[in-house]
Amino acid sequence: MGDLKQEEIEIIHSWSAPRSLSTSLMYSFSQRDDIEVLDEPLYGTFLRTTGAERPYREDLLSKMECDGNKVVNDIIYGPGKKKYRYCKHIVKQRVPGLPNDLLLRGKHFILIQNPLNILSSFEKVVPPSFLELGLGDLVSVYSELCAQGKPPSVIDAADLQENPEDTLSGLCKDLDIPFQDAMLRWEAGPKPFDGLWAPWWYKSVHNSTCFAPRRKYPRPFPFSFYDLLEQSLPFYNLLKRNVRQTSSLLKPLLVPDLPVPKNAKLLAWVGDEILPRESAKVSVFDSVVQGGDAVWEGLRIYNGKIFKLEEHLDRMFDSAKALAFINVPTRDEIKEAIFRTLNANGMFDNTHIRLTLTRGKKVTSGMSPAFNRYGCTLIVLPEWKPPVYDNESGIELVTASTRRNSPNNLDSKIHHNNLLNNILAKVEGNNANAGDAIMLDKDGYVSETNATNIFLVKKGRVLTPHADYCLPGITRATVMELVEKENFVLVERRISLSEFHTADEVWTTGTMGELSPVVKIDGRVIGDGKVGPVTRRLQNAYKLLTEDSGVPIPTNSQK
């Protein structure tokens, strides 16, 4: 191939931290018949600018071009004889003062490696530090390229080791270059394009001929670097979320669509701070992870107000007391966390909050609350969420074989997070393609559904089960008040399943779904199969109540 004009050469920039298989990847690309490679062309500039010490510093400074402008303009973007030029960059070498063209031109991708794997071998040449690891700088490169409208492909070294062909094929597709099978292997030994630092860094890669599978089990981690690992992992995880292909002990799943796409970017309160969705996590030592040991409430926001906030907080504090929680946040502290989280998200309507209070983090894993010495963990999870059921046409229910917990075992009046009893019933409902599943008590009477309280209408009278086995819901109590306000007769008693099958109307109640009509139970059509007049009347009354009542959300604009 003859000389090509400078503008015809396509530059491919690889950005990585040290010990990330970056040299192996350079060797891989060097096997192509249409590419030339440059090994860390900015290394000299980096050493001259930073004064960093290396065993080979003086030799390198005397042999490499150290003027950043000349490196970028004459070497990286200079003329060549191949169609492509591959530039391997260690990201910390992107020092201030380099020409803007470095990022503005060419094709870019980012190679990452879990710092857990990097740190176990890093100090063979230089002591590790946050700067040396370079993950913060990689995030900067990623952000700058995204700001230019050119989000770079991100690949993980683990994927190169586990599935090199698919990973390289995908990378080539992103770079808009054809994949070549020759990229999968190379000859062992030094290469003529190796940097002069190769004897210090490249021993293992010189012994390689391909991307070898990673060790089944990791090396022992040097715990003297534990703090550095904690500092670096958030930056690695941020980039990993954008990886083209992931590898793990579990088979990776496709990223599912969200019911409300807008919720992909939200802020949640965890502990004592507001965090982005993907960073909003609790410790593996938290009681909610260790044993579902937490209490929760569902809240709805209408027109800048939180509906029945005080009633929900009353129940949360009662549940926490029943479970003997200690070091519980105050009512004002919980309210403030809710208000701050809603303001941060700009959520003032059509919003649902999952409010959770866990017993807190433990000092060691185990069941005993004696291990909980940090205080409770508060979680405020807001989402844009319309009512979750079809409140216009109605839903269908089936009866579950799973019975509702008896107070002999676990009192449902404690609004706890250990929801397996409900989840097993919901599994039955899902398997039957029903909206929810009715749960019976130990004597065969209707208790509630897996997620809601339940009502029926028969000959103008409204009936609902006693709250002996079920949670006495806030929405249930509200609707009971509305039934009497609308001058219907209200009866609270034991109700058999056949009475629901033969009812004139049925509906369920809950914060998540509000007041939801039921048109079929276990294949039996309820009434005429349409939403009944009592149901509609109470739905309208409930809607008016949500518009007129609630605790206002304070904002900075309020005086």
Image (cartoon, grey):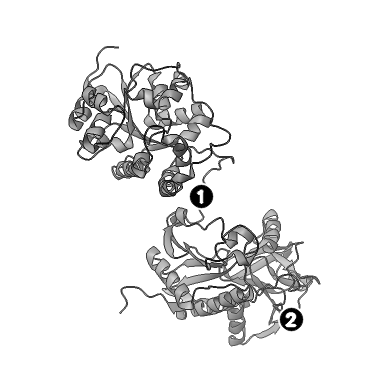
User: Residue 456: x, y in percent?
Assistant: 69, 75
Q: Which of the two labelled residues, at mark 1 and mark 2, occupies the earlier sequence position? A: 1
Residue 299 vs 82, above or below: the answer is below
Residue 424 vs 541, above or below: the answer is above
Residue 227 appears left or right of 359: left
Residue at (56% x, 63% y) in the render: 388
Residue at (61% x, 80% y) in the render: 477
User: Residue 179: x, y in percent?
Assistant: 43, 23
Secondary structure beneath disc 1? Answer: loop
Q: Residues within 10 Å of mark 1 (few under 14, many from 20)?
A: few
Q: Which residue has dot 1 on it?
A: 257
Along the line of sight, which residue is nearer the eye, 106 or 132?
Answer: 132
Q: Amino acid at mark 2?
A: Arg
Residues at circles 1 and 2 in contact by the CB criterion of under 8 Å: no
Please identify the quarter of the rendering in which residue 187 is found.
top left
User: Residue 6: x, y in percent?
Assistant: 22, 22
Instruction: Point out which mark residue 86 bears.
Output: none
Residue 513 appears left or right of 449: left
The answer for how far apart the CA atoms under marks 1 and 2 are is 43 Å
Q: Amino acid at mark 1?
A: Asp
Q: Which residue has dot 2 on it?
A: 493
Residue 54 appears left or right of 472: left
Along the line of sight, which residue is nearer the eye, 259 or 283?
Answer: 283
